[in-house]
Image (tube, rainbow, N blue to C red):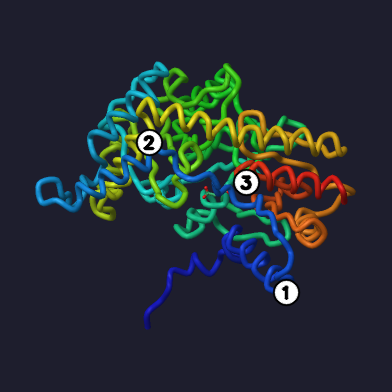
Amino acid sequence: MVKINDNYSKLPGSYLFSTIGKKVREYSGLHPDKKIIRLGIGDVTLPLAPAIIDSLHSAVDEMGKAETFKGYAPDLGYEFLREAIAENDYRLRGCQIAADEIFVSDGAKCDSGNIQEIFSTDSCIAVCDPVYPVYVDSNVMAGRTGDYDSDMGTWSDVIYMPCTADNGFLPALPKETPDLIYLCFPNNPTGAAVTKARLQEWVDYALKVGAVILYDAAYEAYITQDDVPHSIYECQGARGCAIELRSFSKNAGFTGLRLGFTVVPKELECGGALLHSLWARRHGTKYNGAPYIVQRAGEAVYSEAGKAQLAEQIAYYRKNADYIYNGLKEAGYTVSGGVNSPYVWLKTPEGMTSWAFFDHLLERANVVGTPGSGFGPSGEGYFRLTAFGSYENTVEAVDRIKAL
Ligand code: MLT
């Protein structure tokens, strides 16, 4: 008899944002007259910048002519895009990353879910708590996490690094020694940012214990403070212990277009095996490359016009983050994040659970956010609002919350 991968049966409930989507659809089905403002999933709302649209149009035209038509993309990404990334995201920031260390993909979500495949199933993972659910769920699917404790909301074989108000939402080095350490800064969901000095401690630690850091820098475009690094490769020695995941979703609005990349330094090795070769092998076998037109759109992100237009978009979302942060603070909420991040993390009022507050906001203010407990047990009693809505909706949502 055919057997399924039983690890899937261990997963509790559905994916966090699917659960939220279902609840919101049910509510809006019952109350079609209500104007619901969605500040839950971190999905952008501004249209693609003109430089990106122009690039898409001309790439589409190329696809319509025999002389410029493109078939399969190179599986690791077109050279023009890898070179633009290496130059703009790394060399201009003083990081020594070469174009052939960049693996272009259709997004950081896929890469952060897939990267665990190149490591042994008995690798021990350490994650921040709360955490972007993809890191844990993908390891559950791979059978790496042990048993689920439904009371605690934790897995027996995962090292949790609590990020709470007491530690400024920054994890301490774990007591047990992990093999793989997932870090995301600026953080999803708390919006906390790490200084370069603090991140250097993680790099030093990983080098000392022989761990690999999987560093998710999807939100780096929102950094406003000088001592906060945009890449882990700003830290000394990071080439020897870190893989970095990046997205075009949050800095350039590609949530629907899909584009991301992973950086694997060539010298990074585990037990004598080069991780660059393993990830290249995996990419080559399971992936046919991001579409040509989307990679051309990605290239436009780094053009002069693209950079200027995207700086305006980021400023727009930052203004929303300020409005949420300051508005809720004035209203007496305890808030954090929002400064180097599009996410504002707030403490739920009057000891409400995260899901009770979700229902309260949905039903009383018709505002959707994300319950902190959906990201892990230390997220209980917290709630995340995203700055990716329109300014008008953001103002209206905050005003509605204030009026509760
Ligand atoms: C989030 O809301 O946490 C993100 O948008 C999810 C994602 O980027 O996949």
Q: Position of residue 90 (x, y in %)?
A: 38, 24
CA distance separating discs 1 and 2: 41 Å
Number of numbered discs on residues: 3
Determine crowd level at label 1: few under 14, some 14-19, many 20+ residues with C-alpha closer than 10 A. few
Q: CB of mark 2 within 8 Å of CB of mark 3? A: no
User: Is the CB atom of the residue marked by disc 3 within 8 angstroms of ligand 1's nearest atom?
Assistant: no
- Relative to residue 181, is residue 62 drawn left or right? left
What residue type is disc 3 on?
Answer: Gly
Nearest the viewer among 272 and 334 is: 334
Q: Which mark is residue 171?
A: none
CA distance separating discs 2 and 3: 22 Å
Element type at marker 1?
helix
The residue that appears at 67% across and 36% down in the rendered structure is: 321
Q: Which residue is mark 2?
A: 51
What residue type is disc 1 on?
Answer: Leu
CA distance separating discs 1 and 3: 23 Å
Q: Which residue is mark 3?
A: 389
Q: Position of residue 147 (x, y in %)?
A: 59, 60
Toward the left, the furthest residue is: 67
- Relative to residue 360, is residue 368 drawn left or right? left
Q: Which mark is residue 30?
A: 1
Nearest the viewer among 180 and 196 is: 196
> Sequence-wise, which precedes: disc 2 or disc 3?
2
The residue that appears at 29% across and 40% down in the rendered structure is: 296
The residue that appears at 38% across and 45% down in the rendered structure is: 259
Q: Position of residue 9 (x, y in %)?
A: 53, 69
> Sequence-wise, which precedes: disc 1 or disc 3?
1
Confirm whether residue 39 shows in the render: yes
Q: Position of residue 231 (x, y in %)?
A: 46, 27
